[in-house]
Image (cartoon, grey):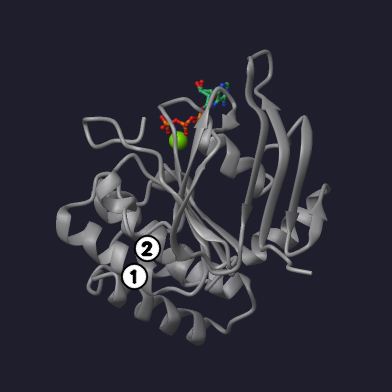
Amino acid sequence: MTTFPLEISNLSFAYPSGPEVLQGVTLSLAAGERIGLAGGNGSGKTTLLHCVVGLLRPSGGMIRAFGRECRSEPDFRALRRRVGLVFQDADDQLFCPTVLEDVAFGPKNLGQSAEEAASNARNTLDRLGLAGLENRVTYRLSGGEKRLVSLAAVLAMQPDVLLLDEPAAGLDEGSKQRVREILLGLPQAMVVISHETGFIDGLAQRVAVLRDGRILPENPSPGTPSPRGQSSLRAPKPCENGKWA
Ligand SMILES: Nc1ncnc2c1ncn2[C@@H]1O[C@H](COP(=O)(O)OP(=O)(O)OP(=O)(O)O)[C@@H](O)[C@H]1O
Ligand SMILES: [Mg+2]
């Protein structure tokens, strides 16, 4: 039997005294698969990822990680050791005084020695073109720099699954291209939220669109085999402005 790194079944969620944002979301991520997650502003993309890592508790449905159903905080704590979330807002991710401390924090938390974690952090920063930022005060970085450091902080932990909430937003073309190439070179399964078709095209093997609290049905089409051994799924056609919704 195939074990999916991530399975989301019929997930529902509403913020207190608000309408249901998620109304039965079902999505499975296969090993090594890269899924683009699209949908209009406020459609619930960030909410969905926050439910997956246990920051928000759904009112119904199920999340299974590596074959194990997650219900309690200890379940989600175990999930977060293997599933790394890059927050949409970098200020939610970064909290250490310096860049190096921020990027080394996760690896250290996973049991690496201070030296190992620092070396890991330096290498990750280097790969992202951020060498030289190590001793900068994190909260004084530019928006784009903060976003890249957030990504470094998660990549340095080498999680089995990456959840990336708009990793390309606010980046210049060169940085966007570098991030895209790094993601393409990673073996990990990932869900990438992005409004930019140019970033998602060729990176994601399929695009799931969230609308009215659900994932829209996908159109199967002949193509290269996906990691599941099925034919690849065609991404929905983007709108004229080059965005997904
Ligand atoms: N803490 C909160 N309390 C109440 N409502 C919230 C809260 N956070 C988000 N919402 C609402 O939930 C809905 C989904 O928000 P969410 O941030 O998940 O959307 P999104 O698809 O990520 O949007 P965007 O593309 O703008 O990032 C929106 O209507 C938003 O206003
Ligand atoms: Mg969002």
Q: Between disc 1 and disc 2, whose residue precedes? A: 2
Q: Nearer the viewer, residue 64 or 143?
A: 64
Q: Secondary structure at mark 1?
A: helix
When asked about the image quadrant of residue 51, the answer is: top right
Q: Nearer the viewer, residue 187 or 16?
A: 187
**Is any atom of residue 141 visible in this view?**
no
Q: Is residue 162 left or right of residue 56?
A: left
Where is residue 118 shown, x and y percent of the image? Answer: 44, 80
Q: Is mark 1 within 8 Å of ligand 2?
A: no
- The residue sitting at 25% across, 74% down in the picture is 131
What is the residue that sits farthest to the left in this orientation?
173
Asked if the residue at tag 2 contacts the one at tag 1, i.e. Cβ–Cβ closer than 8 Å, the answer is no
Viewer-proximal residue among 228 and 161: 228
Q: Secondary structure at mark 2?
A: loop
* Three-letter code for the amino acid on which mark 2 is drawn: Thr
Pointer 2: what residue? 98
Which residue occupies 61% across, 62% down?
30
Of the pair 71 and 241, the residue shown nearer to us: 241
Q: Position of residue 85 (x, y in %)?
A: 53, 54
Locate residue 137 relative to residue 88 in the image: left or right: left
Residue 19, above or below 137: above
How packed is label 1: few (under 14 Cα within 10 Å), some, or many (20 or more)? few
Q: Which mark, by number, is residue 238?
A: none
Q: Is residue 25 left or right of residue 173?
A: right
Q: Amino acid at mark 1?
A: Ile
Q: Position of residue 230 (x, y in %)?
A: 57, 62
Residue 204 visible in the shown view:
yes
Residue 3 drawn at (x, y percent) = 73, 66
On screen, residue 141 versus residue 187, left or right, reads left
Which residue sits furthest front?
Answer: 222
Q: Which residue is mark 1?
A: 182
Label 2 Cα neighbours within 10 Å, binned few <14 / some 14-19 / many ≥20: some
